[in-house]
Amino acid sequence: METIWKKFGFEGIFWVAVLVFFATNSSYNVLGANGDGTMEPMVGKSYNQWAFSDMNHGIYEEVEMEDEAWTMVQKKGNQFVVNGQPFYFNGFNTYWLMVFAVDQSTRGKVSEVFQQASSVGLTVCRTWAFNDGQPQALQVSPSVYDEEVFKALDFVVSEAMKYKIRLILCLTNNWEGYGGRPQYVKWGKAAGLNFTSVDDFYTDPTLRSYYKANLKARSFLLLYSSLSCYAQLTKSISGLKILACHKCTVLSRVNTLTNIAYKDDPTIFAWELMNEPRCDTDPSGDKLQEKDRLTQLKNQALCLYLAWIEEMAVYAKSIDPKHLLEIGLEGFYGSSTPNRLQFNPSRYAQLIGTDFIRNHQVLGVDFASVHIYADAWLSPWKISDADIPFVKSWMQAHIEDAENPLNMPVVFGEFGISAKIPGYNSSFRDSFISAVYDTLINSTKKGGSGSGSVLWQLFPEGTDSMDDGYAIVLSKSPSTSSIISLQSTRLMTFNSLCSWRCHWVCKKHPSETVLYHDEL
């Protein structure tokens, strides 16, 4: 069948068949396309050969979704699936949504960014679901929360649902921004504990208990709403409404705007344990993960000491088994895979206490995460001719490793180029983004592990004060908007083709995964 189709011009026949199918099946509205539509591996073919010629690249024409399609994202092997069909996505970061939603004067910016993201087909947003001990904090102190900030997070989730955008919600930070690990250490010191490094966050029992209590007492993570067996106290601190949990057993937050429990809400794609966890004081990676750490006690007994990643992943999954979970790693290779160190951007990358392969071979972790910052990693804060080749090799190595040995999807959770670095221009940014999308689409066409990319970062107009140099305002960046929209349409088309349950299925060939036509 494949040989005959190719003989008679497979590309033309394929897309005629697609157009005929859409003409007779009104439940789908997918734009016409030219180029290679076989969904098979294409060696040496360029990104533009899978381009859509009959579309305005700045405006995304969305597939009509039936209500039943809005269900939980799940993982099946090395793919994400929704309703049993592959889910490859184009996404974006806007980390400050919860904080902007607290203030009525800025809340509208949350709606704006979701509306603009939806207009170019972006379907996943990664954002902070934490603010530890800072102004407008969600967690004011260990296990003490500001209910008004929780309601702001409710608004973020409800607006994402309105625009059919799923959320990756990050639970704390490696860095000082919004509190993160440094704030946990400050809380520990205030309680009279002594620490030599912020990295004690990973090993100190009290700080670990603070983080676990945060998973548990943050009511949106907890399991059985019917078992609301808890003690809670509402009080006023500096005029704020505070929810303090004391020895809570099981809590369940219901979104105050949608009346849907977070644990049941398919708007939430996944939880992220931490943004970019690192452990500089232990390059081996043992503090973050060592499955067989034994601590000698005074009575000479031995105690099994689980690593931070595994302990928190398993604990989070025991509380919320429905949603996917990832670590939040940048993707640096470590000592467990010396043959992969060549792909790291520098030797320093293997000295920060993380290990891409080892860290992801952990119970409770559903998919891998990778970040891409060639401008900061290769030639510090300047554009280099090596940037784009690095992007391609970095991504390809992680896609291959996600397929084997990890057998899980991989998400490129942050990538971008800063407008503040010497030599920056929008043309180079477009080339950089296209390189990411090009590499990802080559994996997608094979049904591979490269499952999504999440641009850092998308802003609406009027939010310049939050810009770290990487912000993209679509209305001011027509060429970039066009590239984003094109990628969204490609992925939407692939997912739509795979959703023809009686016509197309994704199956593995002995040497690769291809999309092929199922005989009727």
Image (cartoon, rainbow, N blue to C red):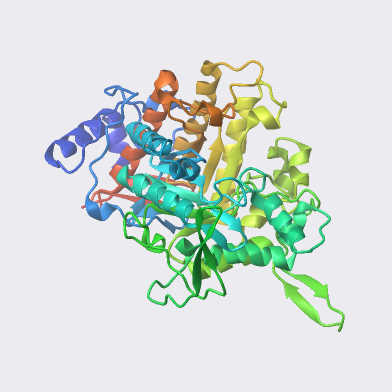
Report whether 300 appears left or right of 243. right
Q: Is residue 285 above or below residue 412?
A: below
Report whether 304 appears left or right of 299. left
Q: Give the quadrant of residue 326.
A: bottom right
Q: Is residue 41 above or below residue 238?
A: above
Judging depth in this view, the residue of 206 and 482 nearest the camera is: 206
Q: Residue at x 69, y 69 (%)?
A: 306
**Residue 38, how many percent across, how many down?**
34, 36
Residue projecting furthest to the left: 24
Judging depth in this view, the residue of 397 and 313 nearest the camera is: 313
Q: Give the quadrant of residue 201.
A: bottom right
Report whether 308 appears left or right of 6. right
Q: Residue at x 62, y 51 (%)?
A: 133
Q: Residue at x 66, y 67 (%)?
A: 209
Residue 203 visible in the displayed image: yes
**Residue 178, how many percent across, how many down?**
61, 45
Judging depth in this view, the residue of 498 and 165 nearest the camera is: 165
**Residue 366, how many percent across, how many down?**
52, 58
Report whether 210 appears left or right of 296. left
Q: Quadrant of the N terminus?
A: top left
Residue 451 visible in the displayed image: no
**Residue 79, how many percent across, how many down?**
44, 52
